[in-house]
Amino acid sequence: MPTARGWAVFAAGIVLHAAARGFGAPVLGVLALAFVLAPAFALAFCLRYRSAQLRLITRVTPARPVEGRAWACDFEIAGRLPRRAALSVDVLGRPLSVPLAGSEGPPRGRVAGIAGRRGRHPVAGATVRISDPLGLAAVERPAAGAGDVVVWLDAGRAQIDGRGGTGGEGRRHGVRVRGTGYDLHGIREHQSGESLRRVDWKTSARVGELMVRELEDAGRVEVLLVADPGSASGVVGAAVVDAALRHAAALVQSLNRAEAGAVLAVEGQRRVRVPLDGTSAARILAFDALACAAPDRGDDIGARLAHCADARVARALVVVTAEPTPELHAWAERAGRGGAVEIVTVAEDEAVRRDAGEPVGEAVGA
């Protein structure tokens, strides 16, 4: 369709045509014809791209923006386009208009800003506006394949000094635990060429031939970190939920560096379980799960943990919750429940309160 500028040019052509007829000026008539036809030619130029199949490619830097910190996004349009166009798109909940240009290759554009609240934000409503060089007409085409952007929590803002989830006074990110080790799987005959380091000499002396021990990874959960955003009742506010999850993210960093058989469990309608094995992949999965966690749990957290296999076998548990309940405290104090439990409540101002249980760091030998 013609733009406002195109309609203005068309109207000017009509006025010039009337003036040419009234004053008998053929030159004005030629100019009037050019003004009248210019928007039509511009529209024909734009309609050449009406059937174009466009695909939006996004590259976010960093790949996972952190709340309150700078980020940038590069856009590229794959498809048949003129050299200049404009992209309209919603990124991190904000409508943006991005000029696209490129002397070589597909048109590209870039935006930058400060990341907002945590969560998974779809890059939605991507539309490319194609116009002629003079801006007299324009058509809009949708672009597919936008994707999502996950905004991480800023773990550095969490106040985890002291005993709230650290197990020691004045230590930041101070959780340290023992490694998992190996369990004895069985004893079998020694095979030719096999190392003698695993020979069980007592058994070998008893049976009169070399016997070796077979070991397997114990796979034991040393520390279970439970991140609980709260229930679907909406008792706590969003700021409190974010503060609790931010505290859990700080503990994830500490436990993942320890490489000590820790597991993160993010509660919700379904539990998300992430083993913290010291790899960057584990950190990414854990931070993604915390960033996208929602207070949508329909049952009590205490009842959930009572039926959680990891909670029964873990040497120690740290429960970071935005909504502590009497059932949770009753479960923590129940005899035969399992390892040591520390319940951590985080307020909106990031203040930490340890509600029950002994310091987990002491329980696991920190």
Image (cartoon, rainbow, N blue to C red):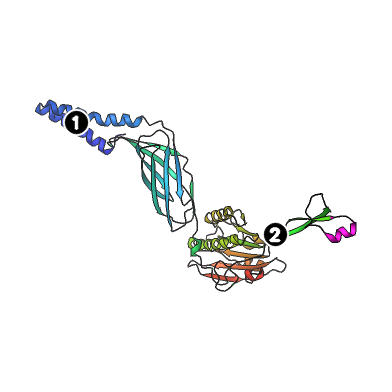
The amino acid type, in three-letter code, at marker 1 is Ile
Instruction: Let me know if residue 308 appears in the view.
Output: no
Report the side of 87 relative to 314 (left or right). Answer: left
Q: Is residue 249 above or below residue 95?
A: below
Specify whether residue 60 is painted magenta.
Answer: no
- Would you call the spot at circle 1 few (<14 residues within 10 Å), some (14-19), or many (20 or more)? some
Residue under circle 1?
14
Q: Is residue 7 above or below residue 119?
A: above
Q: Is residue 250 above or below residue 76?
A: below
Instruction: Let me know if residue 343 appears in the view.
Output: yes
- What residue range appears in magenta? 194-210
User: Can you say which quadrant of the picture contains the C terminus?
Assistant: bottom right
The amino acid type, in three-letter code, at marker 2 is Arg
Residue under circle 2?
220
Q: Is residue 348 above or below residue 5?
A: below
Q: Residue at x 22, y 30 (%)?
A: 36
Q: Residue at x 19, y 34 (%)?
A: 12
Secondary-structure class at tag 1:
helix
Q: Nearer the viewer, mark 2 or mark 1?
A: 2
User: Can you say which quadrant of the picture contains the N terminus?
Assistant: top left
Q: Quadrant of residue 174?
A: bottom right
Residue 361 vs residue 25, the one in the foreground: 361
Residue lying farthest front?
193
Residue 33 vs residue 324, the one in the foreground: 33
Report the side of 77 relative to 315 (left or right). Answer: left
